[in-house]
Amino acid sequence: MTSLTAHRGEILHCLNENEHQYFEDGVLLIKDGYIENVGPSVDLINNLPEGTELIEHPNCLITPGFVDTHIHYPQCEIIASYGEQLLEWLETYTFPAEQKFADKEYASGIARFFLNQLINNGTTTAMVFATVHPQSVDAFFSEAEKHNLRMICGKVMMDRNAPQALLDTPESSYQESRELIEKWHNKGRLAYAVTPRFAPTSSDEQLASAGRLLKEYPDVHFQTHLSENKKECEWVAELFPESKNYLDVYERHQLLGKRSLFAHGIYLDDGEWQRLAETDSAISFCPGSNLFIGSGLFKLHKAREHQVKTGLGTDVAGGDSFSLLRTINQAYKTQQLQGEKLSALESLYLATLGGARALDLHDKIGNFETGKEADFVILDYLATDLLGFKMQYCEPLEERLFTLLHLGDDRAVKQTYIMGAEITF
Ligand code: GUN
Ligand code: ZN
């Protein structure tokens, strides 16, 4: 039987990076989990198909679900760890925590907690690192599948410069990734990402086997880290003296492309920006992490200038929050420190359609175009005393939106809908 639901309230979504659609009193019509129509109430409310359930959302904003383009589920337990920058942070906190994911039961428990956090924060799609253990990917996808979530994940490939217990080999990482792709890629709403951790923990042979996987499975995704921290960049130059620059380490193995996403990119030169643009590769901007582990300030104006696809990432647990609203706030501050602006509408774009484009999923999610999957959130303008107080002084739309994005956090996410259904854990 067909299911039809109409959500009435203030509705905002992005049509592209420069254009949005806003209905102060709008209706979002969902048919069998997909967007059927969106428009002003006056046009739609009296012509709803027979049998449509009507749900009203007063004092709320309805937007597409948030897209987190870079996050590590096995790092939940090390969120907010004190005092270290990237390379020491990996040794001190990250590698010990990731060793626990050899245990599938443990991994499943953390995956459940993690997905619950995403949903409570209005994040409906994420691109996720697992650990080197194939069972960590099985655990993650099994939990995501139970809730019909659109998620991307991959087994970390890492054959050097990490504890022995976390190392694989070029051959074993190739074989294990291949088996995981066969098992999970395009199963329902799940997709696989080939996932070498970053250049320092992979040999050239291993990066070559990642390239081979992308050739054999052209529609799988690719994720890694790039140019995040100064010491890391110096180390990469020492480890790969024949490469022109950091990005070139990956390019030599054909790892760039429209389904490739590189986290961070803080210290890129113009040549690297240009290659990212020419290959239609994407960057994940992770301001919460860049501040928390002291990596540096991302140059969003370079991404704009070179028209490089960009999404937001929380990078938990380099980042200290699961909330893309908090991440927008951090992003704004990193731009202010560089004399640059980040508007409310551009922020919303980065957190929704921009993220979907960065993941090459914009034909399925990211806005309310007819036929897209109905993942959306109900944001409460009055979620806290402070939000409610400040709203009295705001004009629609941009002031109200700016306030909601910057003072909001998980408390502002009233409900999260997945394929048209309210989700509870
Ligand atoms: N670079 C290599 N591994 C990691 C990681 O786990 N987190 C972050 N933020 N950067 C990395
Ligand atoms: Zn990361």
Image: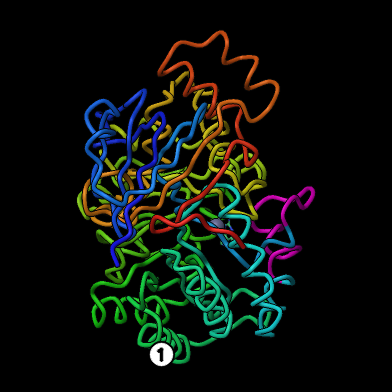
Q: Amino acid at mark 1?
A: Glu
Where is mark 1, residue-wise?
179
In the picture, measured across the screen, residue 267 lies left or right of residue 17, that is right
What residue is shown at x 63% (from left), y 22% (from top)?
A: 387
Count of marks overlaid on the render? 1
The residue that appears at 50% across and 68% down in the rendered structure is 147
Residue 168 part of the magenta segment: no
The residue positioned farthest toward the front in the image shown: 50
Dot 1: element: helix
Task: Out of 321 and 253, give the one closest to the viewer.
Answer: 321
Please tell me whether residue 180 is drawn above or below residue 144 in the rendered image. Answer: below
Q: Which residues are magenta?
A: 79-95
- Eyeballing the image, is 132 above or below 283? below
Which color scheme does this rendered protein use? rainbow
Quadrant (top left, top right, bottom left, bottom right) of the N terminus: bottom left
In the image, the residue with mark 1 has its CB under 8 Å from the nearest atom of ligand 1:
no
Q: Quadrant of the C terminus?
A: bottom right
Q: Give the answer, above or below, for where 338 lies relative to 169.
A: above
Measuring from the top left, give residue 22's x and y in whole percent: 31, 27
Q: Quadrant of ligand 2?
A: bottom right
Task: Tell which of 236 and 225 is nearer to you.
Answer: 225
Task: Locate residue 269: give its quadrant.
Answer: top left
* Residue that extends furthest to the top in the rendered view of this protein: 393
> Visible in this render: residue 252?
yes
Residue at the right extreme, as displayed: 82
**Mark 1 surroundings: few (<14), some (14-19) or many (≥20) residues within 10 A:** few
The quarter of the picture where residue 302 lies is: top left
Q: Is residue 91 magenta?
A: yes
Residue 214: % across, % down: 29, 76
- Answer yes or no: is residue 226 visible: no
Image coords of residue 342 (percent x, y): 43, 25
